[in-house]
Each structure stands twice: as structure tokens, then as C-alpha cells.
Amino acid sequence: MATINVGEVQQLFLQEMEEMLQQMEEDMLFLEANPAETDRVHGLFRSFHTLKGGAGLSGFSELAHYTHKAENLLDGVRAGKLAVSTGLMSALLEALDCLKAFLNEACGRGAVDALRVQSSLEKFARLAGQGGVLLPAVAPAAVVPSAAPTAAGAAGAAPHRSPPMQTFFIRLRFAADLFTARTDPLVLLKDLEALGTLLVFPHPQAVPTLEQLDPHQLHLWWTLLLKTTAPQKKLQNILMFFLEGHDVRIELIDGAPKEIRNQLAIDSHVTDPSRRLTIGQPEEVESEGVAPASQDAPPLPPATPLPPPAPVSRPPAPTSAESVAKKPVEVSLRVNIQKLDGLINLIGEMILIHTRLRQSYETLSVQDEETGGRMGLRENLGQILDDHDRIMQELHAQAMKVRMVPIGGVLFPLKRLVRDFAEQSGKQMQLHIVGEETEVDKTIVEKLNGPLTHLVRNSMDHGIEMPEVRRQQGKNPEGRLALQVANRKNSILIELTDDGAGVNYERVLAIARERGLVAEGYQPTKAEILQFLFHSGFSTAQEITEISGRGVGMDVVRREIEALRGSIHIESTPGKGTLFHIELPLTLAVIDGLLVGVGGRIFVVPLLSIVETLHPRFCHFDTVKQQGELVKIRNQYLPLLRLHQIFAIDRAITDPEQGLLILVEEGGHKSCLLVDEIIDQHQVVIKNLEQNLMLVEGVAGATILGNGCVSLVLDIPGLTRHVTL
């Protein structure tokens, strides 16, 4: 299938489709676990219906055809003709995968597998046949009325009586702001046309002159005559989104009402053919006694404006002003992520300028004090700076909120992963998610998918046991995986737990000794044994499977987490389960940092990594095998990192007792940084060195200080990882 050239309207539809698919997957998984929840059935039906209409409007005909078939299947579920079963949910989840393939093809990210789509449609047909649901064609031919059945009809007549032919009067008077919801009324007309024979009569009386015409407002309204065998409920399903807030009416009639006769008379005097729209076979309606006006017809009323139609049971849609006055409407705006990045970069530059301005103010204040206050600038400039500081903080906070999105978008697909693996492996398990509404920077959310997917796969494969094994151990045969997300100050905490077998410490240690990761005779602690899982290529799996064993690729997981300036550590109890603890910053653009001095150089230590600062005068220092230094703090030996040695800085304090220690912690591991002095605490804007210069080990990025100098932001995980004991 060829890649579709996506225009502006199509691009908007594809963006909405991507969001809808996430919600649909959540609804499907919830419905499978709770088959009695009819609200989810209705929600899925509306989603497929919306996708069908949007696809037809945007020109994706194959997608519209496919969603129409899925919509018909769900209509059978809504009607009670088809039960919610595992087979049905598997077919719907496969349909979701096909929809994702359609989306990827339209965006140029792949191609649709036509065989898979055909297989999915065949499953729809089989399920519909089992449930007694008929799947009509996308565009059925018009039904020709006849008193006697045709030969073909007689030969293949069903044992039951065919549905009777009925005529419906339909009134469509939508709210003027219909176009703002990106709804095309012509799509609705085509859906109604597919049910039978349709006559459409537009009412152009309210259309203003060209000078006064607002192209974003809908001025036309329509009255329709539909001749069909479909029940009235089918019509209501097509118009279900417009039965509230719009003047929409559906009436079953025996003959044409007076309003239609008058409109026919008006249309017969309209010379502009574009003012009259006819869809279907109008001759068929004549057989029911509804004939358009002609020269041979009886005299009809003059073509004068019609009086307002009779009111329907609900009040007409309020005007825009009335709507705003009664109920505030949340308005969202799609913005290109590059524009947001540009805005945040400018805010970062403003923060840097503000820092320099603050430093100049402090210098000026000293001079003002030396002159006895005669300069008279300190107080006035101080007030300006305070106001500027407040506005900068509010502007920065609002800009950060724009980039924040709920983390649930990357968590809910994991439920599908667990569901499919359980079906394939024979294991029983459920993934429970808490805190999906927590908002995180969009960049972080997008990069979390890979690490979380790998962790969940490991928990499923080598964490959760088979049901028989769990029963023997006195456990619930259904394993439990829990993914919990919480916001703590300026960081995000993610915990993935399972109640499975846990890590086999003896086996991990044995493999580590085989690979030469442990010195002979040394007995590492449990925390150190768990760290071996993060070594490249380390695996406890006895055989290769599609789902990697716990530890395979864990080094990649850690690198990706640390690339987000986060940390990860593991806790495990044999026979009870395993916990993965991940800590991430709220945003990658700006951090709170502690400015420290080393030999005249200034470094920034992320505040989230700092446990405490202390004077080492009464600490005990030791060296292990001439390879590393340790400092004893509260009966605990911690690695000592001399920043002046790591970054080759002269004229720095070399005697630890004369300097200062900064106790930092990452992933449950503590270490101490030796610095000359602590300068200040500042909010700094990080610039990526890898993109702008080169990758520097132990450096997360750089920032510009108030005096215009460049300062390096330390990468604490990168520094502590290379400590050799």
C-alpha cells in the first residue's frame, strides 16, 4: 500500500487517531476483565464510529471501510446479540494493531499487512455469524421496492420475513460552531445514504451575503427523507453525537409532512441547481406518494420563506455567548514540539540573564554601601529585581506545565504486553497501575517506553512462576505486577514490583565469578550482587527465549535511565518478588544545583543527588589496594571522589581534612565528593554537551553562570560508576 500524502486536515485526524488508540486499548483491556461494563462497549463503539467518520472525511477509504466493519461488530455487542468473550476481545485487540498499522503507514513509518487485515475481517465475519449479527456492506445498493420478490430473491429467500420498508423524516439543524469540532455534515449524509434511498433538501435562507459570511460558521440546515429497511435505532446510532446540543429530529412517517411539501415547492422554483442536493434514487420515493413538484403537479403555495419549525422536545442549542456564560469550555491547542522547545530555550536564556543581573545588583549594592547610600540605586533596583524574579518563576512554571503530559500514555500499553504474554505462555498475571495521572515532561515520557517495557518483560518471564508452581508454594495462581508512579518534590518515582520468584543470588554470584567480575575470595553483599545484573550481556537465563531473562539488556536500561538524569536500583527477596525503583527529574531543561568550587573552577552538583554536606575534619580515610580511597562516615565506608584529580585541576585542596565533603546518592549507592568550597545554590539551565560539542564522561551538561562563565554540571551516576575498589 502506498504512503498517503498527508495534508493539514489529515494530519489533525492522525494526531487525534493516535490519542484515541491509546484510550481504546485501555477500554478493551478493562472490558475483557469486566465484561459487564456496558459503558466501555458504548465507548468503544463511539471511538470506532468517530474514526470511521474522520477517516472518510480525510480520504483514508481503506481505514474507513475497516473501522466500519469493527463498528458493526460492536453494534452487535450493544444489541445483546454478541457476548463479550476472550475471542471477541482478541479480535478487537488485533483490530487495534491493524489500526496502528494504518496510522503508521499514513505517517510514513511502515506499511499495512493486507493479509493481516483480511484475516481480521474474516474473524469479524465469523464472530458476527456466531452471534447472529449481520455485517452490511460499506455502501449497500438502493433497495428497489416491488410488490413481488425477484427471482434471485425468491431463490435465496431467508426463512424469516424481511424487514419492512419505512420512510423517515430527518431534520438536521446543527449548532453554528459545528466546524470547530472538525465535523463534516456531508459525512453524516453519506452514512445515512448507505442505509437506503435518501432525498436531501437544504435550507439556505440563513446564509449571509459574501461580505458577511464567516467560513468557520455553519449556516445551512437540512431536511431529509430516508427510505430504508433499517430500524430507527440505526439512524440514532449514526446521529448519536448530535442528539444533544443540536436541533436534530428523527420521525417515522407514512407520507410526506406539510413542511416537506412546502420545501419541494420552493426547490421547484430554485433555478440554481447547486441549491438543491439529491442523493440516491428519487424515483423510489415517488412510489410512496412523495413526488417532487413539476409543471403537471397541483398548485403549490408560493415560494415564500417558511415559518420557524415546530420546537423539539429539547431547547435549541444556545449561542456561543450563552454557552460561555453557562459553562466554561476548556480549549486546547496543538503546538509543534519544536516551537515549545524554542520557547523554553528562550526562557532559559532569560533565567541566565536574570542571574547575571542579580550578580550585578549585588556588586552595585556593595559599592552603594561603601559610599554611604549616596548612589540611591540599591533600593529601586532591588524592587525591580524582586518583581522580575517573581515573573520569571511564574513564566518558567507555566512553560514547564505546557510540556507536562500524563505518564499513563506510556504505561497503559504495558497492560496489553502482559495480557498477550500471559495468553502465549500459559501464565496467569495482571498488571496494576497506580498514579497514571502523574504529569511528566513529554521528552521523558517518550523515552521511558523502552526501559519500562524491558523491565516488565523480565518480571513476566523470570519473575512470575507458572500457576502450578505458585499453587505449590501457597501463592495465588495469578501473579501480580504493580507499577506505581508518584511525584515527590521535583522528581518522579516509579516502582515496578512483582510477587514472583525473586533473584537467585547464588546463581547470579556464580555467573559473576565465571565472568571474572568478582575477586577470588571476596564475598559481595546482596546489594553488590544485584549490581552485576547491570553489566553488559549479563544473563541468568538458561535458554534464549523471545522474552529476555532478568538481566539481559539491563545495562541498556540503566544507560537510558541515567541519560534522563535518573537512577535505578533493585531490591529482591527470594520467593517473594522483586522491586525496581526508578527516580527521574520532572524536567530535563532546568535543575536546582549546588555551586561548588574546585581550584578556582565552579561545578554544579544536582541538588536531587545531594544527601548532606559535611566537614571531614573528624572523618577517617583509608586506601584499598592502592586503587581507591574510602572515607568512614558513621561507621560506614564510602568511596571518595577527588574532583581535582578527575578533571585534572591544579591549585586545588588536596588534603581532605582541609576541604569539604558532599555526600551524594544515586540508585541506592552513596559516595563523597571532595571540593574546596560551597559557593551558592542556583537554578541552572542545562545545555547538552553531546549535541553541541562532545560526550564527556561524568558530565551531564553545561550552564552559564551569572558572571558569564561556563560551568559543568556533574553526572553523579557516571562518576560513581567508575569508582574502583
Image (tube, rainbow, N blue to C red):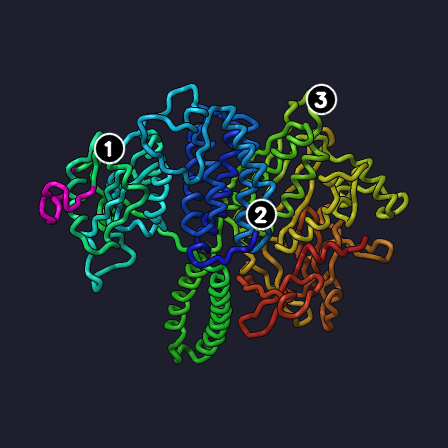
Q: Residue 330, can we see it?
A: no
Tell me where residue 578 appears, x and y as whole percent. Answer: 68, 35
Relative to 634, residue 311 above or below: above
> Do labels 2 and 1 touch, CB within 8 Å?
no
Q: Nearer the viewer, mark 2 or mark 1?
A: 1
* Lower position in the chain sequence, tag 2 or tag 1: 2
Residue plotted at (66% across, 38% down): 579
Q: Which span is picked out in magenta?
A: 292-310
- Determine the main secondary structure of the stretch shown in magenta: loop
Q: Nearer the viewer, residue 199 or 499?
A: 199
The residue that disc 2 covers is: 112
Q: Nearer the viewer, residue 433 or 709?
A: 433
The residue that disc 3 covers is: 468
Q: Nearer the viewer, residue 597 or 289?
A: 289
Mark 1, residues whose alpha carbon is within 10 Å: few (<14), some, or many (≥20)?
Answer: some
The residue that disc 1 covers is: 288
Distance from disc 1 to disc 3, alpha carbons, whole Å, reads 69 Å
Is-magenta flag for residue 322? no
Secondary structure state at the residue bearing disc 2: loop
Q: Amino acid at mark 3?
A: Glu
Q: Nearer the viewer, residue 197 or 348?
A: 197
Distance from disc 2 to disc 3, alpha carbons, whole Å, reads 40 Å
Is-magenta flag for residue 302? yes
Q: Amino acid at mark 1?
A: Glu
Q: Amino acid at mark 2?
A: Val
Relative to 631, residue 298 above or below: above
Tell me where residue 262 appears, x and y as whole percent. Answer: 15, 42
Tell me where residue 355 appears, x and y as whole percent. Answer: 50, 69
